[in-house]
Amino acid sequence: MSTIKSKLGFYAAQNFINNNTVIGLGTGSTAEYFIKSLAERYHKEKLDILCIPSSENSARQAQELGLPIDLNLNNIDLIDITIDGADEIDLENNIMVKGGGGALLREKILASNSKKVVIIADDSKFKKKIGAFGLPIAVSPLSYKQTISKIELLGFKASLRMNKENSPFLSDDKNHIVDIELPKSKLDLHNLNRQLKDIPGVIETGLFIGLGSLAIKGCADNIEVLKFKI
């Protein structure tokens, strides 16, 4: 799997990055390979680029590799291109699930402020129906118990994400993450996204709807570039 992720990162860095570009850096294991390949190309070709990380981990990796970064999105107007991974991808309906690493808020902010969003993922992430992975939700620590109760009133099983020390997981933005189980039956994800965001205490959902431009799909023997349905 790491070989596929390495190929995806290299392909994205070589074929989707131009000079004089503001780049959103995704978060996760696949994005890490992209950042590594981008840094190699940056130093080799002396590219004029600026990187906007979507997490502290991505920022740390970019800094260690010598990439120029800005941690404040307010300093620019628009990101030219964001390269990120995803937990599940439905190309036909332009829906993704993200947030397995807990960075969904910053990832969605970057994606929604990008001219183009390119997703890199192995073939196992492409689904005809979203839901096998579960859905991460960023919630306020102030009222996470009440928020979970309101989510469960919608008919879903929800659980607070815990870290290795068995204490509540905290995102880079100091939010908790609640993971909800999606039913196997067909579900209106647009409506679900609205219902969840109407709950006081829900900061953001891991449903990325209408934010994808292209997907780079990797498997053992080839890489394919696919379009999201707009």
Image (spheres, grey):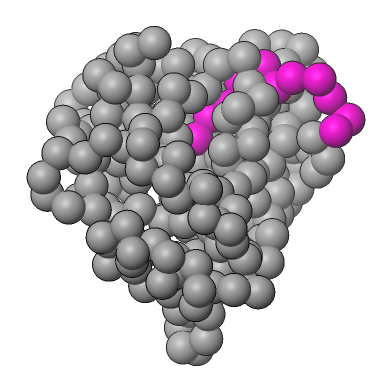
Question: Looking at the rendering, which quadrant does residue 91 occupy?
Answer: top left
Question: Looking at the rendering, which quadrant does residue 187 occupy?
Answer: top left
In the image, residue 18 sits, relative to residue 25, either above or below, namely above
41 relative to 71 in the view: left or right:
left
Q: x%, y% of residue 162?
A: 45, 78
Spot the residue most to the right. Answer: 75
68 relative to 5 in the view: left or right:
right
Q: x%, y% of residue 213?
A: 45, 16
- Give the magenta part as a residue range: 74-85
Residue drawn where x is 11% and y is 45% of the image:
185
In the image, residue 217 sits, relative to residue 134, either above or below, namely above
Spot the residue most to the left. Answer: 185
Q: x%, y% of residue 60?
A: 70, 54
Question: Looking at the rendering, which quadrant does residue 40 occupy?
Answer: top right
In the image, residue 72 sits, relative to residue 59, either above or below, namely above
- Out of 41 and 127, give the one closest to the viewer: 127
- Out of 99 and 12, give the one closest to the viewer: 99
Residue drawn where x is 52% and y is 86% of the image:
167
Q: x%, y% of residue 170?
A: 60, 71
Residue drawn where x is 70% and y is 49% of the image:
59
- Out of 214 and 194, give the one closest to the viewer: 194
219 relative to 62 in the view: left or right:
left
| Residue 47 in view, yes or no | no
